[in-house]
Image: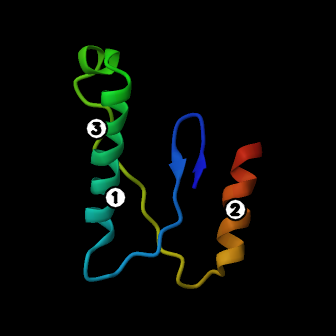
Amino acid sequence: MEIMPDHVHLLLDINPRIGVFRVVNQIKGYSSRILREEHKELRSRLPTLWTRSKFISTVGAVTLEAVKKYIEEQKHV
């Protein structure tokens, strides 16, 4: 995981029977609930914490090291 100012990079190994969209939506829902519990002001200021948008890409043809390098380089862009 790498947290950027306006987005988060997650490298996940997901069971294809569960589905990547389901897992991403669960992560967004869980993190929204936790953040709203910890920061009560978010409840009244924002109708929703996350947007419905997401970018998902598979890395079947790329090594794990290449993905890690890409994410690390994003810090300096």
Mark 3 closeness class: few <14, some 14–19, many ≥20 residues within 10 Å: some
Which tag, 3 or 2, sits closer to the chain's start?
3
SS assignment at label 2: helix
Mark 2 closeness class: few <14, some 14–19, many ≥20 residues within 10 Å: few
Q: Nearer the viewer, mark 3 or mark 1?
A: 3
SS assignment at label 1: helix
Q: Which of 58 and 45 is in front in this view?
A: 45
66 to the left or right of 39: right
| Cβ–Cβ under 8 Å for marks 3 and 2 | no
Circle 3 sits on which residue?
Answer: 33
Q: Where is residue 40 in the image (x, y as percent from the top left)?
A: 31, 19
Name the image quarter holding residue 63: bottom right
Circle 2 sits on which residue?
Answer: 70
Mark 1 closeness class: few <14, some 14–19, many ≥20 residues within 10 Å: some
Residue type at the position of mark 1: Val
C-alpha separation, residue under disc 3 versus residue under disc 1? 14 Å
Circle 1 sits on which residue?
Answer: 24
Does residue 69 sit above or below 5 in this rendering? below
Residue type at the position of mark 3: Arg
Which tag, 2 or 1, sits closer to the chain's start?
1
Q: Which of the image's four quarters has the C terminus?
A: top right
Residue type at the position of mark 2: Tyr
